[in-house]
Amino acid sequence: MKIDPIPPHIIKKSVKYAIAEDLGQIGDLTSNYLISKDQENEWVITSNQNGIVAGINCAEYAFSFIDKDICFNAFIDDGEKVITDTKIASISGRSLSILTAERTALNFIGHLSGIASETNKYVELTKHTKAKVVSTRKTTPGIRALEKYAIRCGGGFNHRLGLDYAILIKDNHIEAVGSVKEALKLAKQKASHLMSIEIEVDTIEQLEEALMCDAKIILLDNMTIDNLKAAVKMNNGRAILEASGNINENNVLEVAETGVDIISIGRLTHSSPSLDISLHCSR
């Protein structure tokens, strides 16, 4: 699957902020005190566990932002599988600069690779079904685009990138306007005919109401497996059905096999552990 890249301006903005946060007011005290400015070495970024890599471009930019003369050579691409001791990239140049950028670079690769790796577990578990594994807006503030990219590296798909991407009528919207029917009526009246509209329901009764209003995309929130099966049967192919809420590695297969079209999983971005990545001097 072709992975849509991260726009360069997003990488630059995110990395610059992270480096500024790390350097503080006076920079890397330890490296400046211990490493001479003319010392040069070659360093290697290595994976310490199995997983899927993401964020190589972020790491590369972290080093080049600190020192444009650093040479960064990636051995693999984002989205590729690695095992323990896989060499991901080599970096050569001034060691003072490399050590200053090290933590920022590894933070990006580790965090994004962790999301990609976790996503891939769910994708592999459900690959024999039609269900797509999809991320949510439960992302780390400021780096959503990067985390959504990591989802794609793991073989998953993206839900809304932001509030302006599509209409998703949630339970609180329904409470505010009074009913599923009223919420859909208002959305259809005001939205462009090109804009997709999805509505969240948490009972079979609400699903029936949504279908009667000709909803095209319906989110089934926190439903039991039996209710998901009943929802798929009632829907009979009329709307796209998305299952969401409390989905994990232990139940995702059962959810996928109910026949839903989409499975959205918040934990992919808010709870995935980082992939263990390290940097070592090779010469």
Image (cartoon, grey):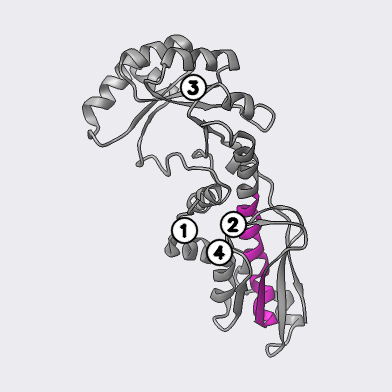
Which residue bears the numbered disc 2? Answer: 54
Q: Look at the picture and state if 199 lies above or below 210.
A: below
Q: Which residues are magenta?
A: 89-114
Residue 72, quarter of the rendered image: bottom right
Residue 5 image label:
1
Task: Assign a secondary structure to mark 2.
Answer: loop
Q: Does the magenta-highlighted stretch encompass residue 110? A: yes
Q: Are marks 1 and 4 in contact (CB under 8 Å)?
A: no
Q: Is residue 173 located in the magenta-colored stretch of the structure? A: no
In what element is the residue under mark 4? helix
Question: What residue is drawn where x is 48% and y is 52%?
Answer: 145
The amino acid type of the residue labelled 4 equals: Cys
- Number of residue marks: 4
What residue would you read off at disc 4? 58
Q: Is residue 117 left or right of residue 207?
A: right
Q: Are marks 2 and 4 in contact (CB under 8 Å)?
A: no
Comes first in the chain, label 3 or label 2: 2
Tell me the kind of residue under disc 3: Leu
Q: CA distance from mark 1 to mark 4?
A: 11 Å
Q: Residue at x 48, y 66 (%)?
A: 12
Q: Is residue 248 above or below residue 1?
A: above
Residue 116, given in percent of the width and then of the height, sits at: 60, 49
Query: Badge 3: how crowded within 10 Å, few (<14), some, or many (20+)?
Result: many
Task: Give SS at disc 3.
Answer: strand
